[in-house]
Image: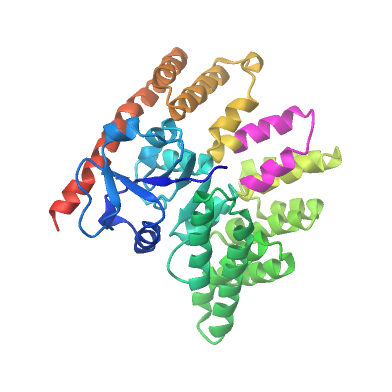
C-alpha cells in the first residue's frame, strides 16, 4: 500500500470530544501530515493550528488518492467509504447501551471493511480481535500498549502493514494481566473474575493455550462461586475454543455439549456430532469457533474446505454476522437462490453493499426490488434518510461544541 500524505478525521462531536489518547496521537503527527477534520465551522482553538476544517462539500471534492479516512462515528460509513480513500482507519466509540440499532450495524460494517481499527474500549477491542486482524487498543492504561497502537497508526499511514505489532500488543496485554493477578493475589476473589477471564482470552489469542486454559478454569470456578447465570455459557464454553486451537476437535465438541441447555443448542450438538461421524471435522470446528464468536478462526478454517455447500453457507453467514458484506455478496450466487425469502435477503445485502460503495441509486433500486417480497424492506430506504441527517448533525456538532467554549 502507498503512503498517505494526509488524513481526514470524520469526528464524533468535534475535536474537543475526541478521547485524550486520540487527540495526543493526532497532534503529534501534525508536523508530518496534513490533517483535516470534517466540519461546517472553524476548528476550535484547542486543536493544533495545522488542523484544517473541511466542509461536507469540500470532502466530496477532496483528492483522496493519497489521503486516509479516520472515522470516529459509525454513521459516517457511507460518506467515508464512498470517497474511496487510500486507506480506511476506524476509531469508533464502543457500542453503548440503548444506542440506535442502525449505529450498531454501521459500526460493524465500518470495522469489517477498515484497514486498521483502534479503540479505547478493551471489551470492544477483544470483540473485534475475534472478527478481524488489524485491531489495536489505545486506552492510556499502559505505556507499552499505547506505544504499539500509535506505532500501528504511523505504520499504516507510512504504507506498511502493522501486522507484526498485533501479537506484540496482545502479548503485552497478557503480561499486564499476569502481573495484575499476581499483585492482587491477596485481594477479594470477586475482583479477580474479569481479569482472569481477560487473561485467558489474551493467552488464547497468542496461542499460549495451556495458560489460557488454566486462567479460564479459574475464572469459571469463580463465576460458579459467585452464582453467575452465564458461568457455563460464557466462561466454561470458551474452553471448547481453546481445545479447538489445540487440535482437539472431538473433545471441544464434548465440552460445548456440557454447556448446551436450550433445544437449539442441543440440536447444534447433534449437527456437530453428525459431522464428526462423517469425518467432517473442519465443518464442526468452524461452527464451534463461530459459536464462541471467533469469526476470524471460523472463516480461516472454512477457507480450507473445498467443494462443500455447507462450508459455503457457514462462510456466508459468518461474513454477514461479522459485517464483511463485500465478502458475503461475493460468496453468493443469485441463480442458486430458491425461495422468495432468500432472494429478498440477497437484494437487501446487495443494496447495502451498493450503499457502502457509494452507489446510492443502485442501493435504492435493490431495496425497492426487495420490498416486492416484503414491505419491511422499505425500512432500509428510511435508514438512508437517517444516515443523511446524522451526517449533517455530526458535521455541525463541532460548531455547537465550540460555541460553548
Q: Quadrant of residue 299?
A: top right
Give the side of residue 200 with respect to residue 394, left or right: right
Vertical comparison of 339 with 213: above or below: above
The x, y position of residue 233, in whole percent, is 60, 55
Give the side of residue 300 with respect to residue 155, left or right: right
Q: Is residue 306 a member of the stretch shown in magenta?
A: yes
| Residue extending furthest toward the bottom | 186
Is 148 or 101 nearer to us in this picture? 148
Residue beneath the point at 61% across and 34% down: 317
Vertical comparison of 229 with 2: above or below: below
Residue beneath the point at 50% across and 82% down: 188
The x, y position of residue 184, in whole percent, is 53, 83
The x, y position of residue 93, in whole percent, is 39, 52
Image quarter hosting the C terminus: bottom left
Is 44 or 73 nearer to us in this picture? 44
Magenta stretch, main secondary structure class: helix
Q: Is residue 296 a member of the stretch shown in magenta?
A: yes
The colour scheme applied to this rendered structure is rainbow
Residue beneath the point at 18% across and 47% down: 399
Is 192 or 247 nearer to us in this picture? 247
The x, y position of residue 90, in whole percent, is 45, 47
Vertical comparison of 251 with 276: above or below: below
Q: Is residue 361 visible?
A: yes
Vertical comparison of 243 with 63: above or below: below
Is 111 or 97 nearer to us in this picture? 111
Q: What is the span of residues highlighted in magenta in the rendered image?
A: 295-318
Amino acid at each position: 500500500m502507498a503512503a498517505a500524505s494526509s488524513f481526514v478525521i470524520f469526528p464524533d462531536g468535534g475535536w474537543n470530544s475526541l478521547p485524550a489518547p486520540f487527540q495526543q496521537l493526532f497532534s503529534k503527527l501534525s508536523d508530518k501530515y496534513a490533517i483535516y477534520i470534517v466540519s461546517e465551522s472553524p476548528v476550535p482553538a484547542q486543536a493544533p493550528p495545522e488542523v484544517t476544517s473541511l466542509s461536507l462539500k469540500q470532502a466530496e471534492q477532496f483528492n483522496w488518492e493519497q489521503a486516509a479516512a479516520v472515522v470516529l462515528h459509525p454513521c459516517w460509513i457511507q460518506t467515508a467509504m464512498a470517497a474511496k480513500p487510500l486507506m480506511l482507519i476506524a476509531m469508533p466509540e464502543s457500542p453503548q447501551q440503548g444506542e440506535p440499532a442502525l449505529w450498531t450495524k454501521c459500526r460493524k460494517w465500518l470495522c469489517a471493511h477498515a484497514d486498521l481499527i483502534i479503540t479505547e474500549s478493551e471489551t470492544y477491542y477483544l470483540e473485534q480481535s475475534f472478527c478481524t486482524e488489524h485491531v489495536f487498543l489505545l486506552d492510556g492504561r499502559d505505556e507499552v500498549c499505547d506505544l504499539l497502537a500509535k506505532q500501528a497508526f504511523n505504520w499504516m499511514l507510512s504504507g506498511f502493514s502493522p501486522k507484526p505489532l498485533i501479537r506484540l500488543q496482545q502479548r503485552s496485554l497478557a503480561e499486564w494481566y499476569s502481573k495484575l493477578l499476581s499483585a492482587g493475589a491477596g485481594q477479594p476473589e470477586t475482583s479477580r473474575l474479569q481479569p482472569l477471564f481477560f487473561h485467558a482470552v489474551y493467552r488464547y489469542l497468542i496461542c499460549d493455550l495451556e495458560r489460557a486454559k488454566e486462567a479460564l478454569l479459574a475464572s469459571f470456578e469463580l463465576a460458579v462461586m459467585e452464582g453467575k447465570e452465564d458461568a457455563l455459557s460464557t466462561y466454561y464454553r470458551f474452553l471448547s475454543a481453546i481445545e479447538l486451537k489445540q487440535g482437539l476437535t472431538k473433545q471441544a465438541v464434548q465440552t460445548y455439549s456440557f454447556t448446551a441447555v436450550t433445544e437449539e443448542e442441543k440440536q447444534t450438538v447433534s449437527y456437530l456430532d453428525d459431522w464428526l461421524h462423517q469425518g467432517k471435522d473442519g465443518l464442526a470446528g468452524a461452527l464451534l469457533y463461530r459459536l464462541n464468536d471467533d469469526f476470524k478462526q471460523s472463516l480461516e478454517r472454512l477457507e480450507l474446505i473445498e467443494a462443500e455447500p455447507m462450508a459455503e453457507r457457514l462462510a456466508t453467514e459468518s461474513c454477514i454476522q461479522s459485517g464483511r458484506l463485500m465478502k458475503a455478496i461475493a460468496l453468493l450466487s443469485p441463480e442458486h437462490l430458491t425461495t422468495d425469502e432468500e432472494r429478498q435477503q440477497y437484494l437487501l445485502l446487495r443494496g447495502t453493499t451498493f450503499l457502502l460503495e457509494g452507489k446510492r441509486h443502485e442501493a435504492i433500486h435493490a431495496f425497492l426490488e426487495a420490498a416486492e417480497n416484503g414491505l419491511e424492506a422499505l425500512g432500509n430506504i428510511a435508514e438512508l434518510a437517517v444516515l443523511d441527517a446524522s451526517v449533517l448533525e455530526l458535521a455541525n456538532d463541532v460548531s455547537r461544541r465550540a460555541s460553548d467554549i
